[in-house]
């Protein structure tokens, strides 16, 4: 346990950030899952619509540094590739 005032503050900040980052990551998982569900149903229009909603979310999270920009690009690329395969 932290004893110094600055260490206690840092622990509190880290916890707040951890919770916020977790919610952003969960949001990304949910939008990606929506696209994947539409892909599995072979519904190209729904998949493209879900993909259009997912891209800004993924970019926003990458812009905040919560996920790496290359990971965001990889997710978008793989989803787009799967949609094109339908």
Image (cartoon, grey):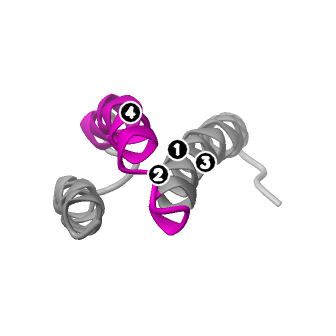
Is any atom of residue 6 visible in this view? no
Residue marked by disc 2 = 35
Q: In terms of secondary structure, where does tag 2 sit?
A: helix
Residue under pointer 3 = 30
- Answer with mark 4 or mark 3, whichever residue precedes in sequence: 3
Residue located 37% across and 40% down the image: 45
The residue pinned by badge 4 equals: 49
Residue under pointer 1: 31
Which quarter of the rendered picture does the C terminus lie within? Answer: bottom left
**Could you tell me which residue is drawn at 19 percent across and 53 percent down?**
69
Residue at 68% across, 35% down: 16
Q: Nearer the viewer, residue 68 or 15?
A: 68
Q: Position of residue 19 (x, y in %)?
A: 70, 42
Which one is in front in this view, the residue at disc 4 or the one at disc 1? 4
Q: Is residue 50 left or right of residue 77?
A: right
Q: CA distance from mark 1 to mark 2?
A: 7 Å
């Amino acid at each position: 346990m932290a004893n110094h005032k600055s260490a206690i503050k840092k622990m509190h900040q880290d916890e707040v950030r951890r919770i916020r980052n977790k919610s952003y990551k969960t949001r990304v998982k949910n939008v990606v899952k929506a696209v994947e569900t539409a892909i599995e149903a072979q519904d190209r229009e729904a998949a493209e619509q879900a993909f259009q909603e997912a891209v800004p979310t993924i970019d926003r999270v990458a812009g905040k540094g919560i996920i790496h920009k290359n990971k965001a690009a990889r997710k978008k690329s793989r989803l787009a590739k799967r949609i094109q395969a339908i």
